Amino acid sequence: MIPQLITSSRIEERDRKRDRVQDENVDRRSFLKVMGAVSVSSSLPKAAFGLHPASGPMVEQSAGTGYDAGAKPKYSIKFGVIGLDHYHIMGMTAAVIRGGGELVSFYSNLPQAIADFQKMYPNARLAGSEDEILDDPSLQLIAGAPIPRLRTPLGIRAMKQGKDFLSDKPGVTTLDQLEQVRKVSAETGKMFAIMYSERLEVRAAVQAGYLIKAGAIGKVVQTVNIAPHKVNDITRPDWFWDPAEYGGILCDIGSHQADQFVYYTGSTTAEVTAAQIANVNHPAHPKFQDFGDMMFHGNGGAGYVRVDWFTPNGLTVWGDGRLFILGTDGYIELRKYIDIAGKPGGNHLFMVDQKQVTFMDCSKVELPFGPQFVSDIVNRTHTGQNQEQALLAAELVLKAQKAAKVLTFNN
């Protein structure tokens, strides 16, 4: 469902005048449906927004929810959790429950992770083994976040047991694993979904998808992702430092960005244009990769990604993640987790089109993945995540990681 618009008569009259003098490629009414609830400050001077006099006043809006989040989930399933090595599993579990999932049991061999998970989900039963969960015929889904290299083997076991699988990213760490996933998924008819949370669980990213589908910036030409992360040697497990365990920086955190490239450009085929990686500042962990970037080209557009582990401690969040989406009729910028220019909180969306500069507060946009994914499991559809696109994103980062030039900086 598309967010609804609440607007003032003054804005409507202004838009009607503009519509009469401009040849719109996208019907104005359908465009407005994704613009959300509006709070406009167009009467304030341009200097109040730091804008050049040649640009119009910034229109400030609050995006609508997108759908009735308070409605009872339409479908229900039972699911289990295996592997708590990455705490992304907390959000993954919450998304499935939000969509109508009933968490029955979980398994891990990490005492602290078990305790933390039980605090959040006290009604779930701690199983004695992975097999106990995999063999449970009442479960339709397994969600897992073990060490990255173990996610594909777990997913294959789940699919062969007649269950769909939702993996933390990266779901796949080698091209051989990817081949196995595609083969077993085709044979069993089961899904190997990957939780690309930087799109699926970020409200501003969801709103950007609504706007693009409505044609707000025309045809997407390119995505640019800047994805810095904060590293802390004390809290990281041993596997975190070994590319053989996590797949390398492009495979790991870069998988989020490849997913966004595929999704926003609508690419169904794509290749790696160039890639490079480096260990710039972690000599104590010589195999670790703390910097990487890559370029893609697909049948829907182009993409550039930069990932790194250099977020300074002065930033109050783990990374100043940015996404720039260039279209033929405008562009969108997401400041996902923080706006260092001064706006509080996260989920900021800026859009420039042929008419104006718009800021959208996306903090109230609801996250549709959970209900959509549960519906997909019940109805054997692919609304929450397109299976082929999810695996295409995985393929791109695996190819980029394999082909990446290793950089060294001596000065």
Image (cartoon, rainbow, N blue to C red):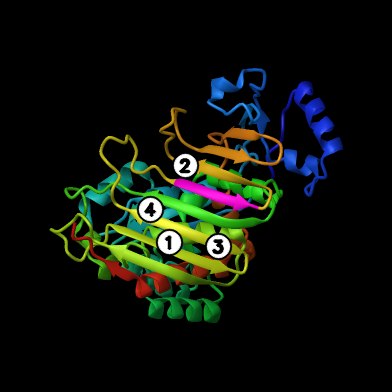
Residue 144 x %, y %: 38, 61
Residue nearest the viewer, comparing 101 with 366: 366
Q: Which mark is residue 89?
A: 4
Where does label 2 land, which residue?
Answer: 336
How far is mark 1 from mark 3, CA to CA?
16 Å
Ranked by sequence position, the earlier of labels 1 and 3 is 1
Viewed as shown, does residue 39 lie left or right of 50?
right
The mark closer to the camera, 1 or 3, is: 3
The range drawn in magenta is: 322-327
Q: Is residue 323 magenta?
A: yes
- The kind of residue tagged 2 is Lys
Which amino acid is tagged 3? Answer: Ala
Amino acid at dot 4: Ile
Most foreground residue, 147 or 99: 147
Instruction: Give the alpha-carbon distance from disc 1 to disc 2, as whole Å.
Output: 17 Å
Q: Is residue 385 visible?
A: no
* Residue position for label 1: 255
Residue 197 appears at what percent x and percent y? 46, 52
The location of residue 49, given as percent across then percent down, is 55, 24
Cα distance in 3D space between marks 4 and 1: 17 Å
